[in-house]
Image (spheres, coloured by chain):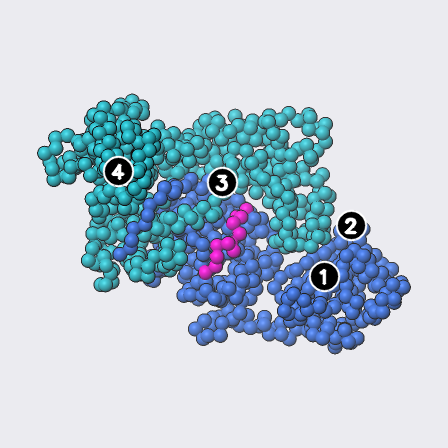
Amino acid sequence: MILVPPKLFSPVVPYQVPSNTPMAPMEVPSHYWRLVRIDATSRLNSVPLPSAKAFLKHQVVDVQSRSDAGANVVGYPMADGLLQAHLAQLIPPSEDSSAPSISLAEGCLRCYISHQVEAACRQLEVRFGHEHGFSRHDLFPYVLDESYPLYPVHDRAEGGYQSLTADILASFDPSRASLSTWVTRRVRHHRDLNRFLLEHGVYLVSDWAILNDTTPKQLRRIFAEFHRLSPSEIQSAVDLLQSYHAVYRRDRILHRQSGGASSCLPPTPEQLQRMVQQLPAYHPLQQHSHEILGQLQAIATYLRQYRIHMRGGMASMESLDRPEVGATVTALPMSPLEADADEGVSEFLQFYRQQLQQCLDHAISEVIEQRVQRLQRRKHNTAPQFLKALYLFHCRGQSMGAIATAVGLDQQYQVSRLLKLKELRADIRRRLLQLLCDRIRAKAKLYASPERLSQLDHHLEIVLDEQIGQLIDAAEAEASTAQTQTPASLLTQRLCRHLENRGDIQ
Amino acid sequence: MISYPALTTDFEHESLEPAAVPLEADQICHALHLSQGISQPEQQWQVYLNALALGAVQTWLADRTPHLHVAPTHTPGDTRPINPMTASCLLDVGTFKLCILATGTLIDSVVSIPKATLEMFEAVPHLYVLVQVNEEQEECVVYGYLQQNSLMQHQSELLATEEEWAYEIPLSWVESDPDRLLLYLECLEPNTMMRILPQVETQPQTRVFGETQALTHLVQTATEQVINVGQWLQDQLDQTARELAWVLLPSLMPAAAMRSGNDEFTNVLQALGRGGLDIAPQARGAYHDLRWEGGAMRLYVVIWPLPAGETDAPEWALLSILGPQPGTPLPPGVGFQVYDADQMLVERTLTADSGAHYLYAQVIGTWDEQFWVTIQLPNQGAMQLPPFAFQP
């Protein structure tokens, strides 16, 4: 069953388009008369509907003739919103069951929607497909489920199947969004599509989890400062959230204790009933209790928008394939210590460069061994895969995608999860600092403060990532055969040496 | 009724975090059980998240720093009086005390810090660790950390937002570098993140058993001997300095005397001056001879007031110089540290190959600030001197 909020929306109302919108006299956009669907072999087709095309030509002329005189500009496409509104008006209402087949107006709109569904799948592929190992063709079967010939929206026997496209059309409310936006959102929130995406490491947090994790105090602040809602709306939302918490969260803990599944399901009608009972007597939902689900989803949508805004401020995507090349090694980070402190640090490093390689080899060996042992103790021993993936990455310079295939994983992101390269490098650096410290006792005081330690770690990071040519003799550099285009860093070189010397990589 | 939000096509999907720590079934079980025991419904969910976060941090540390001993600070049988909300988030890691801050799927610009962790002496942690709990997906992400002494530097801002059981702080105060946290836990001593004792509340309802310890510390610092270097400007040593055998050096003025002097002290000051150090002409100095079984050295302290300029409060400068006593060189491995009331400010150590004859450092503070100098001996021992205050 496709989840939609209760049908609160008013019937389709035409857009108020500015009167000087230009329109083309004979332009018939193919989005409205070609239906995008997948055939029995899951191949994408764009099926022309000639009757729809003819109908559309007529409609465009009709709309054209009713527009303002000064608006005719040859060659410009018709504004989508205007055409959609016009077509929607032509769909016979559900009471008129005498209509034997789907109206042409409805057919045109469903063609348009099918194009938007395809576009939404394409967007998901562009954003996540490469890293998570799927294409839009994997997504189509979930959402391009339109039958051919089309069944009317309103022809629905009890429990009969309704395509997503038809459902989208039935639930569309132009006062909330444009049709293309509505389609995109419905596709992205599709239950089965999301199950597929989750299997591939792409996650959509549920409305119910967000509501669980938000306190009334947070809600108040976010609604007031970020969304600027009115005080009465805020109070209404806070009351509703509290009654939601009292019912849903408590039930969830009991549900999880008895071994229930982890994904948050929408509240049941019975739960919604109990929530209404928890609301104060003056709450508006007491008079409109059937709207409670929609109101909860509205709160969740507001919170989601805030979350996206916050995440945008914090996000930093690292390039996963060649992090050493991708990482920007900028000037030495200057912390507000006196100049002498810097001298002391670089003096330390200079003194130990000859010790560095030895300690580095020890650190690499220990950290890898530690990781291997951890992996061996797990239910599925992934240690051999880990070692092979590590080798292919550092010694053969292969991409994450190629490594995934080579070690028998489905997706690139699973390789990232297995390798945890950033953490590996941090662990090696940390062990290196400890070993260097142990070696020479008098230097131990350099680790006495967090600031000094941070600075050392920064310097080490740069030293380990430095291109080989700067660190060792030119002669030696010529002797080392670089497998990849870019010269490997010191860390890569030593890591590779260690892996090659192990006996246990297939 | 709430008006419906305008819809956008911003991407709401996210990649699952590769560095996420999966929650084990028994950890989830334990967290559920713990939350069931909480009578306050608003606290129940938070305790549940706290317990999940605590479990995740234990897994994370076992993976990344397996040699560190990790255990929850409070075990079920613990009879010490502590709020269950706070108890569910305290963790002992090696010699460090950690407080785990759990948030859910809502990414917010503020973070809540339990008040109890700042009001109970025993509960004051060295580090706060922020963990994002994804209860639905049964995994957590260690976001970052905040040092307790960093938090206390913003103490006045903190009290302004106090409410109910927690303070709120901006997310920007949290360092989003969990690898750095591991580095500190493995390589540092807790005293480098010296916990600052917070101001003790005077309202009766917040009086807790930790107050005695806090008061003892305050009493100690109040009656500690202090060397008032401000009196040196009047050509005087106070009683403490005299008792400790400090020797006051003559004025640096007239400048002529400074230029022609061949005494060691003026040579050093001239060298420092050439090196760029700006010593006021009215500065006064004194020295103190130190002796231990391995050798001897001399600590010079030079002080001067700073002209009241851009800042409202007048300031003073303390220049510490560690050098040899005449005739014997300074042994390698010696050093000193200068502290203010909160933390170590600066540190100097003489290395074997440095070739320096003196170590020096300058600090500046307002007239109500004191500085402590600790001498490090090569045999790992240390000498703590009374604090220097400037009260001319």
Left or right? Give the position of B262 relative to B158. Answer: right
Determine which residue is flagged by label 3: A317
Q: Colour of chain A?
A: cyan
Where A456 sits versus A37, above or below?
below
The residue under the point 21% across, 54% down is A289
- Give the residue pinned by disc 4: A67
The image shows residue A280 at horizontal and vertical percentages of: 25, 62
How many marks the image carries: the answer is 4
Label 4 – label 3 distance at C-alpha: 49 Å
| Pointer 1 chain | B
Identify the amino acid type marked 4. Ser
- Chain shown blue: that is B
Query: Residue sitting at 72 percent across and 43 percent down?
Result: A350
Image: magenta residue range: B168-179
Tell me which chain the residue with mark 2 is part of. B
Would residue B97 appear left or right of A106 to someone viewing this image?
right
**In the picture shown, does residue B316 fall above or below B273?**
below
**x%, y% of residue B190?**
59, 57
Front tag of 4 and 1: 4
Which label was assigned to residue A204? none
Q: Quadrant of residue A18?
A: top left
Query: Quick check: A495 left or right of A198?
Result: right
